[in-house]
């Protein structure tokens, strides 16, 4: 059935989407043409083609831009989020998405963007406080069993973490502290999640982060409140924010930075992988060494079994007995010869000694006789034999003077043979004068 509406549509010039988009594109290019635009760039991307895709924005609006590889010859700086730039190019429409964009021919840096300036200021201040110092960073545990995660419960980050851990070590216990990771209030929720997991306790490590995005999307991880919560954490913290090219203040404060949430999960379970692999290597090494030890012991046992000791033990004992007998006989001969020699030496020594004693005795006797003869010649008794006498008092003292005698003294007079005892009756002091 045909209606008036369908009849009108047939009569009108109906355009395809492609035709309409192309018309808009041509209109924009003719009416606007080449322009200069100034703003802050964000969401910079550079695929394998080498072209730069980014957004130029100000406080109220934004526009997509592309800098093709051929127009990068005069680019004097590296494009990164937060830069304030002046771009000269043509306004056009990207037909596939129906969005308008600036095809940049020339790009100049006009200053650092507000967010980037804030980032650099906070980074410098916290670094001066020592929050980035290596010595204050905590080491990750060797075998973490309980892992806390601070991120959005619906974002890509938690899905990536769960995927890695469930695939490799599903026995790890995960505790999620849900938090917004973008927009107003996100920084406060992330900091609160870190504090709550610390208060809960029983966790080995924390993963704090989110998936990729622009500088604005990741900004809550550049907030001071998050940085100080990470620094105050008693549990080691892994920062896993954005993609590998993204760096935030949280990355510098955390005990370890992971380029992505998936990489953070790999770091957690990877340590268990390393530990398991190390155990396997040690087990293989121990098994190999034990086998080598057993083989060496078997070789030694086999060699011992083939030795003469085990094959002919009785003959070996007999040989040793014969050696002992031979040694005993030689010792007997040696001892007998030594004994005979000793006896001969002793006999010779005895004869020589006896001769020496006789000679010494004769010399001593001759000397004694000579001294006796001399003594007899000097002895007063010898004088008495020649007719003299010797008188002594009662004390045995020889009297030489008459003055030594008194009447009544008892005297003894010795002759060559015998003695006479007398008592002094009279003393004549004139009798010996020879007058």
Image: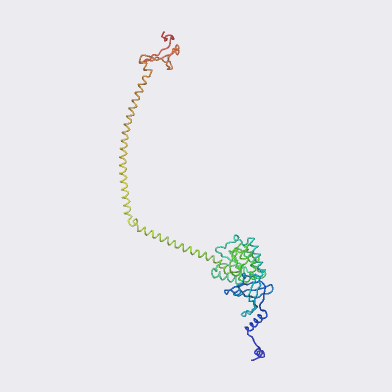
Q: Position of residue 301 (x, y in %)?
A: 38, 59
The answer to which of 414 and 84 lies nearer the viewer is 84
Q: Position of residue 104 (x, y in %)?
A: 63, 75
Figure colour scheme: rainbow
| In this view, 381 is above or below 33 | above
Quadrant (top left, top right, bottom left, bottom right) of the C terminus:
top left
Q: How many marks?
A: 0
Q: Position of residue 178 (x, y in %)?
A: 63, 69
In the displayed orientation, state which residue is furthest to the top.
435
Lateral position of residue 323 relative to residue 10, left or right: left
The answer to which of 343 and 421 lies nearer the viewer is 343
Can you tell which quarter of the image residue 392 is in? top left
Can you tell which quarter of the image residue 230 is in? bottom right
In the displayed orientation, state which residue is furthest to the right.
60
Quadrant (top left, top right, bottom left, bottom right) of the N terminus:
bottom right
In the displayed orientation, state which residue is furthest to the front.
74
The answer to which of 71 and 127 lies nearer the viewer is 71
Q: Position of residue 38 (x, y in %)?
A: 67, 73
Lateral position of residue 264 relative to residue 386, left or right: right
The answer to which of 288 and 255 lies nearer the viewer is 255
| In this view, 143 is above or below 22 | above
Can you tell which quarter of the image residue 350 is in? top left
């Amino acid at each position: 059935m045909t209606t008036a509406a369908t009849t009108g549509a047939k009569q009108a010039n109906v355009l395809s989407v492609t035709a309409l988009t192309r018309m808009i594109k041509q209109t924009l290019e003719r009416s606007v043409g080449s322009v200069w635009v100034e703003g802050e760039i964000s969401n910079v991307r550079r695929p394998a083609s080498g072209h730069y895709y980014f957004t130029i924005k100000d406080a109220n609006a934004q526009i997509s831009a592309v800098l093709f590889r051929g127009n990068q010859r005069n680019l004097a700086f590296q494009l990164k989020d937060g830069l304030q730039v002046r771009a000269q190019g043509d306004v056009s429409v990207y037909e596939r998405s129906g969005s308008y964009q600036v095809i940049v021919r020339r790009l100049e840096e006009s200053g650092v963007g507000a967010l980037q300036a804030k980032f650099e200021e906070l980074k410098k201040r916290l670094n001066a406080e020592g929050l980035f110092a290596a010595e204050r960073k905590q080491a990750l545990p060797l075998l973490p069993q309980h892992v806390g995660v601070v991120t959005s419960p619906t974002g890509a980050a938690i899905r990536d973490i769960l995927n890695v851990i469930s695939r490799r070590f599903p026995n790890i216990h995960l505790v999620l502290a849900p938090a917004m990771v973008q927009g107003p209030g996100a920084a406060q929720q992330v900091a609160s999640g870190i504090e709550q997991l610390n208060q809960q306790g029983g966790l080995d490590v924390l993963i704090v982060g989110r998936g990729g995005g622009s500088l604005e999307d990741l900004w809550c991880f550049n907030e001071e409140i998050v940085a100080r919560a990470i620094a105050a954490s008693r549990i080691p913290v892994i920062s896993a924010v954005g993609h590998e090219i993204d760096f935030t203040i949280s990355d510098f404060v955390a005990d370890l930075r992971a380029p992505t949430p998936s990489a953070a999960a790999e770091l957690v379970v990877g340590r268990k992988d390393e530990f398991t692999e190390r155990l396997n290597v040690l087990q293989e090494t121990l098994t190999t060494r034990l086998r080598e030890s057993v083989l060496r012991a078997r070789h030694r046992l086999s060699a011992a079994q083939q030795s003469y000791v085990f094959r002919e033990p009785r003959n070996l004992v007999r040989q040793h007995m014969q050696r002992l007998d031979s040694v005993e006989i030689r010792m007997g001969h040696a001892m007998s010869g030594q004994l005979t020699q000793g006896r001969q030496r002793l006999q010779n020594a005895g004869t020589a000694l006896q001769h020496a004693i006789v000679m010494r005795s004769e010399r001593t006797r001759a000397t004694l006789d000579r001294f006796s003869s001399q003594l007899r010649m000097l002895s007063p008794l010898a004088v008495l034999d020649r007719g003299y006498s010797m008188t002594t008092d009662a004390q045995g003292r020889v009297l030489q003077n008459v003055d030594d005698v008194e009447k009544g003294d008892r005297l003894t007079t010795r002759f060559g043979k015998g003695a006479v005892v007398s008592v002094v009756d009279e003393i004549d002091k004139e009798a010996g004068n020879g007058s």
